[in-house]
Image (tube, helix red, strand yellow):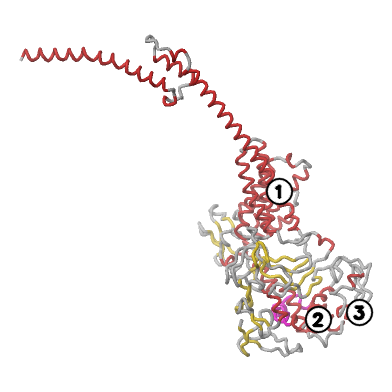
Amino acid sequence: MRIHIKENSSSAPESSGRIQDFEDGDEVIQCFICNQPGLLQCSEFPEVHYCSNEHKGLHQRPSDEDEDEANHDGKVERQSKTFPFVIKYRKDVGRYMVAARDIEAGELIFREDPLAMGPNHHSKPSCLECMRKVDGSYLCPKCQFPMCEEMCSLGEDHSGNECEIFTGIADKILLSDYEQANPKYWNITVLRLLLNKLKDPRKYDIILRMEDHLSEHKKEDTWQLYQEHVVDFLRNTCGLASKFTEEEIFHVLGVIDVNSVKIHSSSQERSSANQNPGHALYPVTALISHGCISNSKTIILPDYTNECRATTFIYQGDEITKQYVSSLETTNMRRAKLRSGWYFDCKCPRCYDPTENESYMSATSCLRCKTGVILPSHPLDPKSSWTCDLCYFKTNGEAVDKLVDYFLDKIKATRIEAVDLWEELLEKASKMFHSNHYILTLIRVTMNTAYIELGDRMELEPDKIPMELFMRRKDLLDDVRKVMDLVEPGLTRRRAGISLFEAATCHLQLGRLLHEADRFGLEDFIQLIEAESVSLQEALRCLEHHPEGTLEASIHYKCEAALYEAEYTKKRMKLKLEEMKHQAQKRIEEREAERHEAKLELAQSPIRSAKSEDAKPSGDFDYLDGLLGSAIPISSQSPSSIVDFVKNDERTSEPKEVLKQPKAQSQTKKSSKQKRRK
């Protein structure tokens, strides 16, 4: 990657140049991760350069890591030492990640450790080492910051420069309220990143290269809070004014706000109940752009290593993207969150398309013509007009947003156990929105949970729960699955949990109940089990790399149990089907044997062996029809009966010729008389 660099005149070391201008300066080949000249070149992907071996290590697997990895077919493939991505630059988006070769779904794209991590801005008082909740019962002996135990006070993250800095102001660290967020914790991650300037300049080069969006930050209300609780606290209270400038501190604050990743969030880990939420900064992850329909996902492991894996097949040269916001939200909602949180306007193909990849998740129903769909004329403009595709009725984006907000308030106000209210809300929303709309999808997902809890409150055995409950859940989940396949394809955790696992288990439970009620055939039930087993296997692929203790791992465990039960049930049903087929074949053979015995008895009977001329052949066939039934064709009868039939036919043909002769003679006499008259 070739760009222009202009050195910054700040007090940073000479090696830490900031990219200020792309028109002035000397052209250099730059390191893929920082702003230093790329002196080393990647042997596998020559367009990638590194400034040092440390940064080269971010693009390669560790030497002690197993390079063999099994693909989705179970075959072990030899993996390259170099991660399959390159970094490119485009002026309108900055740096972005591209696939250096074809990448299979589920394949590892890269793995990295955080530059730093700590409590986030909403954290309550936490242990500075493990981020567990604290109550003030144990304080660090040096700096008086609350810790969970002595071992954490000696931990790698806290002990050292950080603890020494806070030791000088121990009297100002004391906390009184452990149930409210405290702005002193805003400084922890900032300080840990800034200290790299003193102890690890290579890491600090990476931090300097990251986007901070300071021009937008200055317009936010948080700017003054940062000035008071972070900049002034570190420079004045902690006495670090000679080491870090205001610009450097604000830059790190901006980098954290834009590029950090949540850790210990409730959606990530079930075991995080005793840990406060935090954030971590990953340098390579920060290079992945957002996509409203993405092709990768990140997974944080127990040791806080971050993995990026492909969720769909990625062709060489395609951009690698991940989701910053939920894919189920409307275009206006997604773009508003991206603008306020990451300071850019998304222009991805989905946002540009009024139908959103034909998902219609933002479309409303036309109340005038009752059948049309109202879509935005210019999706990238939140204030553009919206037009019905049939009657051309027009409205505006603000009216649509107000309608969405109204139903969101209704959803928040409705209790989860009030199933009747949810049904009413779904009925009302169905008249206002397209069937795939975000509001309807959100209501259906919530209603599925409501019906599950309703079944739990019945305190019945699983096979005693009313069939109607599963039938209602099936209808809801089928609609959700249709939407999920459009906006979140591939091996994503949300698709695994909602679209695959929930739907498959519901279908299997309903199929079993219908089969036991003799309303679902055995062969159809086996086909259902086979189809839903494929869905469960796909769900396992979506969740296979998530660590223990996470919500995804819990669903993975349940999915394995459901798949085992499905395979066991299929085996029993197939044995039952084979037994039924065997019994049916046995009955057919018994009937054939009875018919064969009847034929033999008929062939050996006195009626067939007698050669009396007075015997009536037609009577033989009357007897045969009465014995074997008229459905037996002539060709299936014994040879002797066929011969008799032919003989009988010959005997009955002679009298017919005899009856015809007198008529012929009378005609001859008439013709002779006519000749005489002439």
Callout 1 amino acid:
Tyr
Give the vertical position of 552 relative to 141 (above or below): above
Residue ID for mark 1 = 564
Mark toward the viewer: 1 or 2: 1
Tell me if label 1 and label 2 are in contact, CB under 8 Å: no
Q: Residue at x 60, y 78 (%)?
A: 90
The kind of secondary structure the magenta stretch mainly shows is helix
Residue ID for mark 2 = 195
The answer, for residue 448, to whether it is visible in the render is yes
Which residue is at the front of the view, 229 or 502?
502
The answer, for residue 402, to whether it is visible in the render is no
Instruction: Please give left or right for residue 91 compared with residue 257 in the image.
Output: left
Residue 385, position in %: x, y?
Answer: 56, 65
CA gap between label 1 and label 3 equals: 57 Å
Callout 3 amino acid:
Thr
Q: Which residue is drawn at 39% across and 21% down?
A: 642
Based on the picture, tell me whether residue 501 belongs to the magenta stretch. no
Q: Quadrant of the N terminus?
A: bottom right
Q: In which quadrant of the rendered view does residue 497 lie?
A: bottom right
- Report the span colored magenta: 205-225
Q: In which quadrant of the rendered view does residue 341 lie?
A: bottom right
Mark toward the viewer: 2 or 3: 2
CA gap between label 2 and label 3 equals: 16 Å
Q: Quadrant of the C terminus?
A: top left
Q: How many residues crowd mark 1 within 10 Å: few (<14), some (14–19), many (20+)?
A: some
Element class at badge 1: helix
Element class at badge 2: loop
Mark toward the viewer: 1 or 3: 1
First of labels 1, 3 by sequence position: 3
Tell me if label 2 and label 3 are in contact, CB under 8 Å: no
Q: In which quadrant of the rendered view does residue 179 lie?
A: bottom right
